[in-house]
């Protein structure tokens, strides 16, 4: 397990978005590292602004984290506007806002006609 960073999410929060992240990559062999660690590494880079190669060594290898980031950031072909990563982050923000008693975050819809 790696160090607790301020950018990390809880396992409970991650469990809400895990299926969406799993749907991006076909599983051909058992995973050695938990997707939770990859997701926390991506959040660390997004929050801190550090370079991928400067990820702390207690995260998985930077190149593998970056490959997951690229896969999860690709726009989908199924008619949705965002990527899996954008949708996952939006879901986490919405759940947090609701748990605090705030209004749910709304994503503006665009009419592409």
Image (spheres, rainbow, N blue to C red):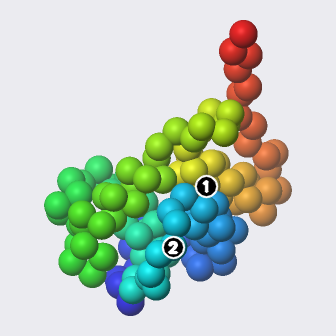
On screen, residue 85 versus residue 100, left or right, reads: left
Residue annotated with mark 2 = 27
Task: Say which of 52 and 25 sits in front.
Answer: 25
The extreme left residue here reads 53
* Whole-percent x, y for residue 29 in the image: 44, 81
Residue annotated with mark 1 = 88
N-terminal label among 1 and 2: 2
In the rendered view, tell whether residue 14 sits above or below residue 48.
below
Question: In the rendered image, which quarter is residue 65 located in?
Answer: bottom left
* Whole-percent x, y for residue 9 in the image: 54, 70
Question: In the rendered image, which quarter is residue 1 located in?
Answer: bottom left
Q: Residue at x 27, y 81 (%)?
A: 58
Q: Residue at x 66, y 39 (%)?
A: 78
In the rendered view, tell whether residue 101 sits above or below residue 27.
above
Task: Say which of 50 and 30 sits in front.
Answer: 30
The extreme top residue here reads 113
* Whole-percent x, y for residue 90 in the image: 64, 48
On screen, residue 38 versus residue 106, left or right, reads: left
Residue 93 visible here:
no
Nearer the observer: mark 1 or 2; the answer is 2
Task: Say which of 45 and 83 sits in front.
Answer: 83
* Whole-percent x, y for residue 13 in the image: 64, 71
Badge 1 marks a residue whose secondary structure is helix
Task: Say which of 39 and 20 sits in front.
Answer: 20
On screen, residue 111 versus residue 3, left or right, reads: right
């Amino acid at each position: 397990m790696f160090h607790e960073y301020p950018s990390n999410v809880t396992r409970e929060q991650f469990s809400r978005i895990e299926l969406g992240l799993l749907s991006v990559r076909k599983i051909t062999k058992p995973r050695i590292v938990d997707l939770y660690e990859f997701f926390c590494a991506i959040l660390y880079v997004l929050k801190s602004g550090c370079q991928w190669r400067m990820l702390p060594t207690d995260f998985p290898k930077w190149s593998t984290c970056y490959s997951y980031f690229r896969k999860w950031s690709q726009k989908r072909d199924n008619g949705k506007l965002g990527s899996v990563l954008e949708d996952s982050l939006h879901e986490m923000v919405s759940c947090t806002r609701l748990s605090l008693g705030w209004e749910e975050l709304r994503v503006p819809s665009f009419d592409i006609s």
